[in-house]
Image (tube, grey):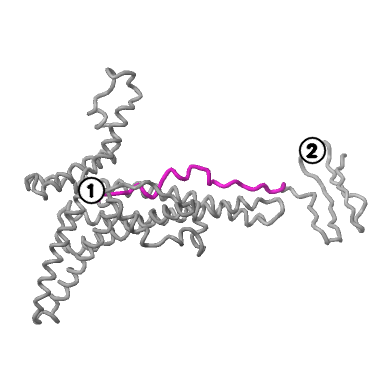
Amino acid sequence: MSSVTFPYAGPNHASSSSVSMSDSQYGGRFSASYEPPSDTSSFQMNPLSSHPPRTPRTSIVSNGSHIFGTDIYDTKADAGEKPQEIEAEDSEEEDEKPGSAKSRVRREDVWREMLKSSNGRDKAFKIIQYSMKMYLLFHLAVTSSPVFRGHKRPPWEAELLRRLTSAIAGFSLTRKCLILFNWLPPLTSILAQHSSDPYATNKSKQKPLLHTFLHAPPPVLLEFVNGLADDAATFSRLGLIGKRTGERAGRLADWCWFASTLVNLVENSVERSVILDLQHQVESRLYAESMAGGATSKSNPSASKLDEKELVRLQRQDYWIQVTRLKLLMDLIFVSYDVFRFKRAKGQVQTFAGLASAALSTAKLYDRHKNLLSKTHTH
């Protein structure tokens, strides 16, 4: 027999407590006797406890959770200028503080920075354009109702409607001109892939450019064709190309927009599943930390703080992913009427979908520029 003795200096405790086990049954069943001390004025660890001291878990802040972004779904309506990705993970805890850098950013400064870019001007013009369309839609619904059908309209109302209709057409053409030559970014990407062909040791063995185009990623190729077709349709509206050619180019652009929107919706779903999985992992760690007693002296409170900060960042990222998905759905509804040539309630549905898409994309762009300005103020 062997015994392991745990000394205890309590006043009413026996001289020793022993754990006895048979040599022939080492590692099997054993009998133990342990009497808790009567003095409970100080914390004492149970010597028979099988749980080792808890070690803090590390956060996944440095893991690859930035593979996906919330900024990769710029469709035909957003294709003017793709701004650089603006992250605000480091300032999320300071957003709610009244004296933080983000709260000191003025709205006028954000709009000024937005309108410096063609993408920001496109968003502003789109909101104005579809707000006018919405007004005309409600005006038509009111004037065609039985209550106002027999009333004589004032003379200035016809002039106002004519001016609004002309302004809507002007904003539409202006937005088309703002996204001219949007095929250059995908072309640059394809040419860069062609020049960095790893299988070509010299120029004589380099694959033809047509082969690179045919083997380009489908989203990049769709964006390239969409940009060319959009430009052809715009040149037709400007009178540089025939009307029939412009109509065909516009129809091709609509099909490319429809296909790219479907692809972006699939990518959005995959991205959100990844974000939700990471969010579940962080929440599980935080729950385990709280249940294990995170306030003990041997715990690492900094790891919990990092997990909390990471959870806030993932929740914010998931919010903008959902905003992007809703915008893509509005774009899909809008372009489906043109692609499949639906006639029922076309004006009403496209006006609502266009205004909702403009509001969502503008809010997203506004948040990016606000984060960028807050970072410049902190530095």
Seen from the viewer's position, the closer of residues 183 and 333 is 183
- Place of residue 129 in the rendered image (x, y in percent of width and height, measured from the top left): 21, 61
Which residue: 30% across, 51% down? 117
Q: Decide whether residue 54 is among the magenta residues.
A: yes
Q: Is residue 339 left or right of residue 304?
A: left
Which residue: 53% across, 50% down? 281
29 is higher (above) or lower (below) than 106: above
Tell me, for residue 179, which label it has, or none: 1
- Place of residue 131 in the rendered image (x, y in percent of width and height, measured from the top left): 23, 65
134 is higher (above) or lower (below) than 279: below
Q: Residues within 10 Å of mark 1 (few under 14, many from 20)?
A: many
Q: Is residue 322 left or right of residue 129?
A: right
| Mark closer to the chain start, 2 or 1 | 2
Q: Label 1 sits on what residue type? A: Ile
Q: Decide whether residue 72 is among the magenta residues.
A: yes
Res. 166 visible in picture: yes
Dominant secondary structure, magenta: loop
Q: Which residue is mark 2?
A: 26
Q: Which residues are magenta?
A: 52-76
- Picture mark count: 2
Seen from the viewer's position, the closer of residues 181 and 201 is 181
